Every structure is written in C-alpha cells, then in structure tokens.
Amino acid sequence: MPDIVLCTLNARYAHASLGLRYLRANLGELHPRSTLCEFVIGQKTEEIVERLLAEQPRIIGFGVYIWNVEETTRVVAQLKLLAPEIRIVLGGPEVSHEVDSQRICTLADHVITGWGDVSFPALARQILAGSAPMDKVIVGVQPPLVALTLPYGEYTSDDLRQRHLYVEASRGCPFKCEFCLSALDQSAWPFPLQPFLDALEDLYRRGARQFKFVDRTFNLKIDASLAVLEFFLAKIADCPDDPPFVHFELIPDHLPERLKAAIAQFPAGTLQFEIGIQTFDPAVQTRISRRQKNHVAQANLTWLREHSGAHLHVDLIAGLPGEDVATFAAGFDRLVALNPHEIQLGILKRLRGAPIARHTEEFDLRFSPDPPYQILANSVIDFATMQRISRFARYWDLVANSGRFKQTLPHLLAATPFANFLSFSDWLYWRTGQTHALAHDRLVNLLHEHLSARPGLAPDFAQALIDDYRGAGGRSRLAFEAHDAAMPPPRARQTGSTPARQARHLRS
C-alpha cells in the first residue's frame, strides 16, 4: 500500500493532471511509496472516498482548482471524519490565496501555496519521519527549473492512448493582465531546451500524438518556439499519415516572419492556436494592465487565417471593468470579421489572488460568492443583461463553435453579428427556457422558425440549414422540409480539414 496518494478531480477523464505528475516525479526516494488517483467531477463523493481509503495512505495530497474545489471539499470533509489520522495536504491555485476564508483549508492539515514541486516532497518526508511542522500554511519554494525532474515519464500507456498530454516548455508570464493569476509572476522561465525536446522525443516514441502546451506565452522567445515547431515538423515529414496534433497559446501581437515561415509548413489539422484577444477596447486594456497592439494582433490573425492551416481558437471576455455592452459588441463584430474558427466567449471570473479585485469598488464588480466566481453585474452591465450575455455565450457554443452550421451562420449573423445573434439568443431562451439539452434536430427546426420571421433574409437560408443538418449526419426529416420532396440520403459527418484526432480534441 502506498504511503502517499496524489489526487485530483479532473474536469473530464481525457484531462490528465500535469501538476500531480510533477509532484510524483520529484518525490525522489519516496516515489516508490506513492501513487496517483485521478477522478472526474461529478463522481459520487462516497465512491471517491472509498477508493482513497482502500489505498490505506498516510498522506493524501489534493490538487485544488476553481472547477473542483466544491467537490474536493466534500471529499476532504468525509476523509477527516472517517480517517482523521491521514494527513491531508492541499495545493493548487484555488488554495494559494485567501486561505483563511476557505472551508477546505480549515479541514486540511497543511496547505502549500504557490509552487509545490519541491515543497510537497519536503513536507512528505517530514510527515513520514514523524516530524510534521506545526504550521498549516507552507509557502511553496520556487526552484530553478533545471533542478526539477520532468514529469513526462509519469504518463502511462493508457494516458497516451486515451488522454490529452499536457506539456510545458516554460512557466510563468511576463504580462500583467489583471484577470489572470499569471499577473503575479515576475517573469517567464524556460525549461532547458534539449532535455525538454528529449522528453518530447520519448513521448512520441511511446505513441503520443496529441500535445497540449500549457505555456502562457509560447511565442515569447522565438528561438525556443522555432526549435519546438521544427521538432514536430520533422515528425510530420517522417510520417505524414500519422501526424501529431499540437496546441499552443499564442501572444496575438508577436508573430515575426521566422515564426510565420514555420507555421505555414504545418498541414491542416495538425496545429491549433489559442489566442487571447480578451478585449479590443484600448481604455479597458489600459485599465487591466493588458499590453496589446490591436492593429498588429488583427493583422496576425488575418495572416494566420489566410496563410496557415492552423485552427484558430480566439478568446473574448465579457464583464471587464468599464466595458459596456456596446464596446463588447464592437469587439465581437470586429473579431467575427477576422473569421477565426472558434470564438470562445468567457465571462469574467474573480480568481482568488488575481489583481482584478482592485477595481471592485470603483466599477461595482459583483461576483458570485461560489465557484467559478463569475461576475453577476457591474457598473455598466446589470444582472439581467449579464444573464443575456451568458446565454449568448452558451448558444454561441451550440451553434457557431460546434461547426455544425457553417452555411447557416452567415444568414444568422448578417451585417451586425452581435446584435443579430443576441436577438436569436433572447428569442431561443424565450421559446425554450433552456440553455442545455437542445437536441440537434430541434435546434435546426428552431433556427428555421427564428430565421423565417426575420425580414429581408435571403430565401436560401432553409436549404443552408438542410445542407448543414445532413452534413452533420442528421437523418430525420426536418419539420420545414416539403413532405413530397425526396429526402436525400444521409451523408457522413463532415469535418472539413479537421481530422478525427483534432475533432475529438476540440470537443473536449
């Protein structure tokens, strides 16, 4: 039986915790006395507790995040009731700030704030030696990255077959965007390049083909970025029938020609960029300490869309201090015109410790007291309007980001994308009272009902809906199809240039 269990509740099974694997890789002589136990949010608390107690550990370390803190709190509460002798150690971003105000921290024996890679092993040695420190809160030590053992050997063969592999070429971020915890970092620190490339080589040799880089600023240091891109380009050249799929987070206004030249070589379906625009409003950018050259970012997005095969996933945030509906709508319309593959509409959240809280009084920021601490209202957007924007974001995922309505979407958005989609969103909620559990067939029929009532719409929108429905594998006769028309045979689901591996990744 292991003395140490490292545990977290992931958002989905396909997500493999990189943080836990760092902790285990750096346990040193305690590594053989440890194991990983990963669960998924939504699992029954008693079943998680039963599994953990069956390991008979002396220490359980939990990775705590905004998405799992409520369920992890219930797990910890039951563990302390049933087995109070087990030492519970917490770590992760959710418990690294405002420790005194959190029930889960009160229940635990120790909380490591910040980096835990070397601080958790040190604490575990003390506990197992019978000399546990009296202090509950332990400030994590930040070691030089060269001193860390890389965690990629902790990925199992099952992980490689069934889950997304998270990797990082650097940690930290030099930017100070106040909605993000990375604003607290002093800089970005690169891992030694050659050992990292050797680790990628080992993962690839073992069969890994999906790599999600968690670096906040992958394209910060161009020489290192190029070395990583060239690694994957070589793999594609060696085996074009079984290419890797690679995801990076990209700084939108930093894309020099050398990087463009490498990006242009990737075939469609092998490269994805997550690009945080967040807001196009210069006043809001200044207010939240976000440095972004909008004209450069826009030019780079245009270049990526027109001259690369990369899939572009671009983020906007609603609810930032001082950004009203009109300016947010203008930014949304500007982004739609750039035609990225996906626009992810996030609602501002108050991450514990993030500097965005300094604007609370001036801009009357009212966040939910419960995770994920989403903003409910502010000085320029009231609660009812924020609810409308939240529904807009949900329906946008169902219609636009799903990729199932490529021919219909231009009819729906027309000349004023935000206004037209908000009108549809308001109507759809009025019509159904639902934001989830809308079956594909029903959604198509509802789109037709809404568009039929819109004046001046081109008459071919109905055929566009039918073609989209059939292209996505729809088999039923739609309510608005002529009953005497010969129904075309269903076609295989179309994914365009997105292969099955990338399509699965995007849905996760």
Image: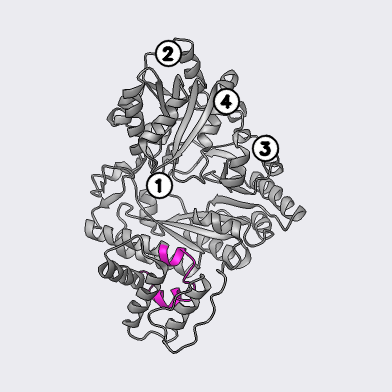
Q: CA distance from mark 4 to mark 2?
A: 19 Å
Q: Is residue 247 above or below residue 343?
A: above
Q: CA distance from mark 3 to mark 1?
A: 36 Å
Q: Which residue is mark 4?
A: 26
Specify whether residue 316 is painted magenta: no
Q: CA distance from mark 2 to mark 1?
A: 41 Å
Which sits earlier in the primary sequence, circle 2 or circle 3?
A: 2
Using residue 489 as the reference point, say whether residue 439 is left or right of it. Answer: left
Q: Which residue is mark 3?
A: 199
In front here: 38 or 293?
Answer: 38
Asked if marks 1 and 4 touch (Cβ < 8 Å), the reply is: no
Question: What range is drawn magenta here?
Answer: 398-418
Expressed as whole percent of the image width and height from the top left, the position of residue 236 reads 72, 54
Q: Residue at x 66, y 52 (%)?
A: 244
Asked if marks 4 and 2 touch (Cβ < 8 Å), the reply is: no
Expressed as whole percent of the image width and height from the top left, the position of residue 348 reads 34, 50
Q: Which residue is mark 2?
A: 132
Residue type of the residue flagged with mark 1 = Ser
Judging from the image, what secondary structure is the residue with disc 4 in? loop
**Which mark is in front, 3 or 1?**
3
Specify whether residue 413 is painted magenta: yes
Q: Which residue is mark 1?
A: 289
